[in-house]
Image: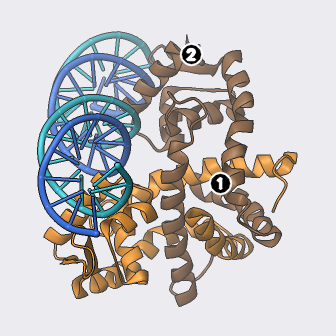
Chain colours: A orange, B brown, C cyan, D blue
DNA sequence: TATTGTTATACTCTATAACTATA
DNA sequence: TATAGTTATAGAGTATAACAATA
């Protein structure tokens, strides 16, 4: 448990916040599928790892309110990227599952995303990129805490 | 210049993108001043380092279109956080400068932001936090490329 | 009575297009 | 003719509040 009252740590926190906000604004524009928002992409990514989930679970994981997730899931279903099934035990809930089409799309899109980020990462040297690569899983953990 | 055709690098890029998007969504809600958007805060941060700039320069730095910056600058001025002066050499341009009030506000807010991020960072161990601290400046560089 | 999900509605932020003033 | 900034307008994404169905 880091001591955030320390000056350097506070500075790092501010630096991190600023960089994350700026980067996210740029990434928003680089969409795999032009018609899919970052959160919609993120939901597909989550489903790719956890298999399937209820709308409520997805809303909590993506830090979005339930009505927003309703809208997102409906849009993804209309595009054939997820399938909605009744919950086996609780008839209030639904189960959202990714379709084969979503798997193919996510896979196919990886190349394009890399292409854009490559243009940014090429501005880094090997050491900087190594630092960032090491930090990626930590950032993911932080985002999920 | 890293080789992004390599599988691990591509995976790191995806991990990075996902984490940055998720984190940014959460940070959006943790505002110093409830009435200031992330971009507005970011503009103040930029002015804190570069002193003053024209609206056009700010729009480019924040990766926002000029009309959006017009709105942001107008809002910041109405709150007494920036001052608008005529450009000394080009009467089409304006010079945006931070006020003393903005300096105080940014300073005062640092504690609060740290308080929130601390709750997340406390979920990391020392090594993870060290990794993230090292990556912060690289992320900033990447965001500015 | 509490919880899951939905519908209706409004708000915030940003973008594009068209305009004004200056270079 | 080109550039800096603005105004007007539209669109995307999200939130809150009120509601329906089920537990």
| Residue B50 spot, x, y in % from top left | 68, 33
Snapshot quadrant of residue B131: bottom right
Mark nearer the viewer, 2 or 1: 1
Q: Which residue is mark 2?
A: B89
Q: Nearer the viewer, residue A116 or C7?
A: C7
Give me the residue at 67% from left, 73% from top.
A129
Q: Which residue is mark 1?
A: B140
Residue D4, placed above or below residue D16: above
Q: Nearer the viewer, residue B63 or B124?
A: B124
Does any portion of residue A116 appear in the rendered image? yes
Q: Is residue A130 left or right of residue B39?
A: right
Snapshot quadrant of residue B33: top right
Q: Chain of mark 2?
A: B
Q: Is residue D5 left or right of residue B89?
A: left
Give me the residue at 28% from left, 52% from top.
A67
Find out whether the residues at labels 2 and 1 contact each other: C-beta distance under 8 Å. Answer: no
Which residue extends farthest right?
A: A6
* Secondary element at tag 1: helix
Does any portion of residue B6 appear in the rendered image? no
Q: Nearer the viewer, residue B104 or B138?
A: B104
Give me the residue at 27% from left, 80% from top.
A89
Q: Mark 2 or mark 1: which comes first in sequence?
A: 2
User: How busy is the neighbourhood of tag 1: few (under 14 within 10 Å), some, or many (20 plus)?
Assistant: some
């Amino acid at each position: 448990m880091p001591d955030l009252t320390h000056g350097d740590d506070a500075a790092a926190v501010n630096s991190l916040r600023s960089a994350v906000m700026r980067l996210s604004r740029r990434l928003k524009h680089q969409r795999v599928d032009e018609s899919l928002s970052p959160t919609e992409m993120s939901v597909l990514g989550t489903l790719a790892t956890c298999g399937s989930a209820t709308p409520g679970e997805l809303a909590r994981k993506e830090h979005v309110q339930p009505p927003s997730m309703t809208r997102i899931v409906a849009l993804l279903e209309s595009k054939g990227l997820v399938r909605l099934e009744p919950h086996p035990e609780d008839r209030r809930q639904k189960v959202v599952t990714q379709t084969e089409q979503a798997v193919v799309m996510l896979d196919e899109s990886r190349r394009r995303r890399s292409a854009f980020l490559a243009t940014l990462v090429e501005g880094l040297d090997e050491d900087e990129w190594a630092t960032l690569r090491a930090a990626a899983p930590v950032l993911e953990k932080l985002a999920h805490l």
